[in-house]
Amino acid sequence: GTTAGGDAAGPKATDQLVVGFAQVGAESGWRTANTKSIQSAFEEANIELKFSDAQQKQENQIKAIRSYIQQGVDYISFSPVVETGWDAVLNEAKAANIPVILTDRAVDSKDDSLYVTFLGSDFVEEGKKAGEWVVNEYKDASAPVNIVQLEGTTGAAPAIDRAEGFADTISSNPNLTVIASQTGDFTRAGGKQVMEAMLKSNPKIDLVYAHNDDMGLGAIEAIEAAGLVPGKDIKIVTVDAVKDGMQALADGKINFIVECSPLLGPQLVDVITTLNEGGTVEKRILTDETTFTQEQAVTALPDRQY
Ligand code: GYE
């Protein structure tokens, strides 16, 4: 027909666009910075954002996505709390002709027509970078090095992939052994609690590999409470590089941090603007990231945005 609507009508004015975003939760400093980045990028672009917080529960995210479908938003974006179990709701979005953009975390689905693109970090690569630091730090070790791992949320892409990249890399030196590994749910309280238990059951721990800064910061509290010196008696490697983590690194309590950027808002707005204008985007959009030693943290801290 000749009536306006749909793609044939051409791009919508940005202030006519409505996007629903289903966030994981507010579990970490990283997540807070990510939420801020998304909210301010949409505000700046003058695109309406419907935002929900799932408190780390998949069922809440599914509910939020269903409500966005019902409201007939133009685009849906979300950061899946876990990798599996999304096909049904994503098929509902597809049937309603609402494009879905994954940010930060991936889904494990055979059908990649269920989303337009996945925008975020390479978590396996992050695990590798953490592992490379450990391999180098202990290259002269002739005795076993006892490593404990604080895992992220069970079933979440960053927990699965950061464990995998790390394990693959440290396997090059048989002295490097992960003696205990448990989830701390990406929270500071979780990291502290798990570390307390690990300290009780393992007399000699040389290094903690935490899947995020917050759990590393919780581990620091547990290590200090046990009368040990974090960064010296027990070394700590984490992922994220949020301000509190960088401060602990600069203070010598953490030994190495692999950066994972939460500032995905501007890239998400770019994707939506491009799609709105009829353009296409890559199926996988990677974020640029670096790593920080203690010296580098001292230099980088004053300009850190989050
Ligand atoms: O590393 C952690 C957060 O999905 C990359 O989630 C994100 C992770 C991040 O809770 O701090």
Image (cartoon, grey):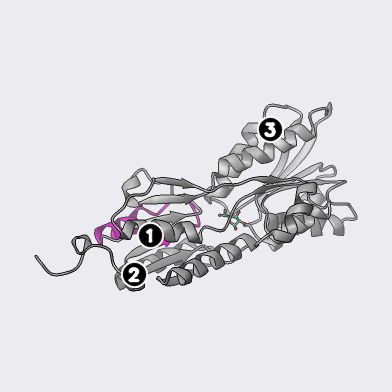
Report if the CB atoms under discs 2 and 1 are less than 8 Å apart: yes
What secondary structure is found at the residue carrying circle 3?
helix
Q: Of the residues under marks 2 and 3, which one precedes in the sequence? A: 2
Question: Residue flagged by tag 2: what amino acid is it?
Answer: Leu
User: Which residues fall within the magenta stretch?
Assistant: 77-96
Residue at the disc numbered 1: 272
Question: Residue flagged by tag 1: what amino acid is it?
Answer: Ile
Residue at the disc numbered 2: 17
Q: Is residue 96 left or right of residue 196?
A: left
Which mark is nearer the camera, 1 or 3? 1
Which circle marks residue 170 in the picture?
A: 3
- Quarter location, residue 248: bottom right
Q: Position of residue 136 (x, y in %)?
A: 76, 32
Q: CA distance from mark 2 to mark 1?
A: 9 Å
Label 3 near ligand 1 (CB < 8 Å):
no
Which quarter is ligand 1 in? bottom right
**Residue 237 colored magenta?**
no
Label 1 near ligand 1 (CB < 8 Å):
no
Q: CA distance from mark 1 to mark 3?
A: 40 Å
Report if the CB atoms under discs 2 and 3 are less than 8 Å apart: no
The image shows residue 155, relative to residue 133, as above or below, that is: below
Q: Position of residue 74 (x, y in %)?
A: 32, 66
The residue drawn where x is 66% and y is 60% is 187
Q: Is residue 146 left or right of residue 94?
A: right
The residue drawn where x is 25% and y is 58% is 95
Q: CA distance from mark 2 to mark 3?
A: 47 Å
The residue drawn where x is 37% and y is 60% is 273
The image shows residue 292, relative to residue 263, as above or below, that is: above
